[in-house]
Amino acid sequence: QQLDVAFALRHVAPGEHHIRQQVPQDFIQTSPEFGGTMSPGQVVVDPDVESSATGFLRLSLNQAESLLNFDVRFENVIGSTTGLTLSRGGAGTNGQVAYDLQAIANVPDGFGGTVTGIIDLADDLLLGGLTADDIINDLQAGNRYVTVETDAFPTGELRGQVDPQTANVVVLNSGGLI
């Protein structure tokens, strides 16, 4: 009997790691993985968003760097959700939308606080004429952000800057570490 499981570990302190998640099948940790926290205070278009909403996001590439797995989780939005996008821009700036994550995840308006999906960097509709390499380079440089739009805040109730994360994968194969 063989057991194949992969876990992503988060570095906490020298010599100390916590298991952060079980990695989806076919996703091997690339260096780095990407993530961030989401808050109303990061919204640039309407900096006066008053909301107690919070969230976090995680993105990871498969080993071939052809698929981008996304996991966006949020809670306490005031309005009904109307959009979820991955856009180009550094912290404190707005940029063009690259991917409509709501459409890729195939969720209707009013979607709940967890949205997951996989962007095929070669085949999914890429807005703005950018290439997959542009997306990967921007992710590595921290020049991407995710926005949750609602009917109360159509330009965004939550925003989270996507930053490179430090994580490692330990693969357990038949009980042994590889």
Image (cartoon, rainbow, N blue to C red):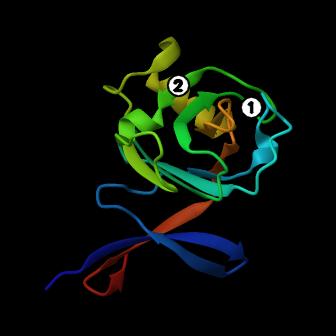
Report helix, strand or loop for mark 1.
loop
Q: Residue at x 54, y 43 (%)?
A: 81
Question: Relative to the observer, which residue lies in front, 8 or 109?
Answer: 109
Q: What's under tag 2, amino acid-wise? A: Ala
How would you rate the neighbour count of disc 2 (Cα within 10 Å): few for under 14, some for 14-19, many for 20 or more?
A: many
Q: Is residue 11 above or below residue 165?
A: below
Task: Identify residue for label 2.
Answer: 98
Q: Is residue 25 above or below residue 66?
A: below
Task: Identify residue for label 1.
Answer: 90
In this rendering, position of residue 153 left or right of residue 74:
right
Q: Could you tell which of marks 1 and 2 lies nearer the N-terminus?
A: 1
Separation (CA) of disc 1 from disc 2: 14 Å
Question: Relative to the observer, which residue lies in front, 64 or 106?
Answer: 106
Question: Relative to the observer, which residue lies in front, 145 or 3?
Answer: 145
Q: Can you give x and y, in whole percent of width and height, for residue 33 in the image?
A: 55, 52
Q: What's under tag 1, amino acid-wise? A: Gly
Q: Quadrant of residue 154?
A: top right
Which quadrant holds the C terminus? Answer: bottom left
Identify the residue at the far right of this view: 48
Q: Residue at x 37, y 43 (%)?
A: 118
